[in-house]
Amino acid sequence: MYHYLVVPPANNPAARLAVIMRRLHAEEPTQTAKEALTHVLDCASDAELGPALGALHALPAQVVEAVNLHADPEHDDLNLFLKWQSGIAAALNQTWALTSAVQKVQAKYTSEDLSHLDYCSGLLSRARIERQIDARTLDELRNLIQSLEKDLMDIEDIPADLKSFIIDQLDIIRTAIREYRIGGPLAFEHAFDRVVGACLRRSELVNDANEASQSSLGKFREILGAVESLAKTTTVSAGAAMAVIGAILAGHHAVENWQSPPALEHSIKKADSKPPQSGDGSPGAGITQEAGR
């Protein structure tokens, strides 16, 4: 039986890798690797599994890079911190054999490997390399998306091409929510960049939008503001990038009248805040699992 250590919140690549590998080890060993990975990575189709598996394979290198950057060579034993590498690498290489039993993947790594990943996670959590995003924040974003999608279906006078455009952008954001468990806040940064680019490219859709569309466009602005606040990096003050998009989506409103929507920002723990302690109910905190080998 595996008795896993309590790990810090999943606000760094080591924590995300450890959580995923724990969940994978808890899967029924006789099912195929594809079945287990589809469940663990929360994929609805093969089209989703491919990118998710690729992102999972990228995590170890991200962990090594971050640990080398933030560890103190005078006080931290890098060999001890990175002792998990060979076992996890062997397990991930085995995941490419999607039709074989996941037991072959599970046999490649041990509880000791996961403990060393936990050491890395603790180091990176203290370094605050990412802001902490809690589960409630992601649920609120999902609810905003669902509410807007319902409006788009219910309001018949919204132009069809505008409906289609907004739905496409919401799909991008929904994908980012799913990919966050592997890629972290960078998933939201990529989604924000894609949606902003699409808004700039198709600005005529919203500039010419009719009165019936204004409520839905307002919700769309709110969702974009939320995604911006979830993005990994902020090179300007929160909402500054949204000023440009707000002007486009508002059509006749001036840029200087745009204000970043406050929705969701209250529940985001900024990078300079105190990291949640184990057992506080945060995602990843106090995770203790047992899996039969």
Image: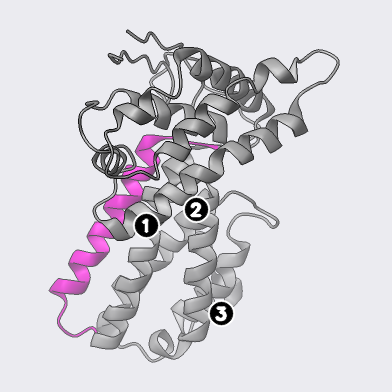
Q: Is residue 137 above or below residue 121?
A: below
The answer to whether marks 2 and 1 mark residues whose Cβ atoms lie closer than 8 Å is yes
Q: How far from the left and from the top, in percent, is residue 68?
A: 75, 31
The answer to whether marks 3 and 2 mark residues whose Cβ atoms lie closer than 8 Å is no
Q: Amino acid at mark 2?
A: Ala
Marks 1 and 3, how far apart in space?
31 Å
Circle 2 crowding by C-alpha within 10 Å: few under 14, some 14–19, many from 20? many
Q: Which residue is mark 1?
A: 175
Q: Earlier in the sequence, mark 1 or mark 3?
A: 1
Q: Residue at x 41, y 48 (%)?
A: 53
Q: Residue at x 26, y 39 (%)?
A: 39
Which image quarter: residue 162?
Answer: bottom left
Q: Which residue is mark 2?
A: 187
Q: Is residue 125 above or below residue 201?
A: above
Indicate left or right for 224 with 45 as reference: right
Q: Amino acid at mark 3?
A: Ala
Q: Nearer the viewer, residue 74 or 248?
A: 74
Given this view, does label 1 or label 3 mark the residue nearer the observer? 1
Q: Residue at x 30, y 32 (%)?
A: 102
Task: Give the extent of the magenta segment.
Answer: 132-158
Marks 2 and 1, how far apart in space?
8 Å
Circle 3 crowding by C-alpha within 10 Å: few under 14, some 14–19, many from 20? few
Indicate left or right for 15 with 36 as reference: right
Q: Earlier in the sequence, mark 3 or mark 2?
A: 2
Q: How far from the left and from the top, in percent, is residue 8?
A: 51, 21
- Residue 159 in sight: no
Q: Earlier in the sequence, mark 2 or mark 1?
A: 1
Q: Which residue is mark 3?
A: 254
- Residue 114 in sight: yes
Q: Is residue 119 magenta?
A: no
